[in-house]
Image (cartoon, rainbow, N blue to C red):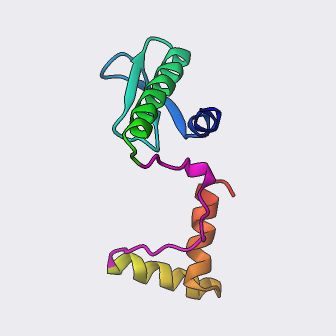
Amino acid sequence: MKKLQARIERYTYRVTWSQEDGEYLGLCAEFPSLSFLAVTRARALAGISRVVQEVVGDMQANGESIPEPLGLHEYSGKFVVRVPPHVHRRLAMEAAEGGISLNRLVSDKLSYEFGR
């Protein structure tokens, strides 16, 4: 049970304001169908954590596979993305003008966007 609790604590949680509901909304990236509304951020986080713990307990009891925390995944750094032809053309032209590869240009743009 201790190992399972450690896994649950490593899931990716987020609390955001729900204007529609007038409350804070607790979410878990590994379980996108789950959410928890509360009047404070702290209660929303505690609530979604409890919901996840209950769901994981049920999954374990039923022999279902339990999602691995996203933070523990190994990522290759490679993915394929499709863009409209006009975007591809603009990026290729910008890369050529900068004397760098298209891959380097897109990687630099993504790194800048995400702060690394």
16 part of magenta stretch: no
Q: Residue furthest top?
A: 39
Q: Main secondary structure of the magenta part?
A: loop
Q: Which x, y percent locates residue 57? A: 45, 32
Q: Which x, y percent locates residue 15? A: 50, 28
Give the total of numbered labels. 0
Q: Which residues are magenta?
A: 65-84
The residue at 58%/66% (across/down) is 109
Q: Residue furthest left?
A: 20
The image quadrant that residue 85 belongs to is bottom left
The residue at 66%/54% (across/down) is 115
The residue at 64%/32% (across/down) is 2
Q: Is residue 55 above or below residue 86?
A: above
- Identify the image quadrant of the N terminus: top right
Q: Which of these two is toward me, 70 or 78?
A: 70
Q: Which of these two is toward me, 3 or 21?
A: 3
Is 100 situated left or right of 102 in this image?
right
Q: Which x, y percent locates residue 25? A: 42, 25
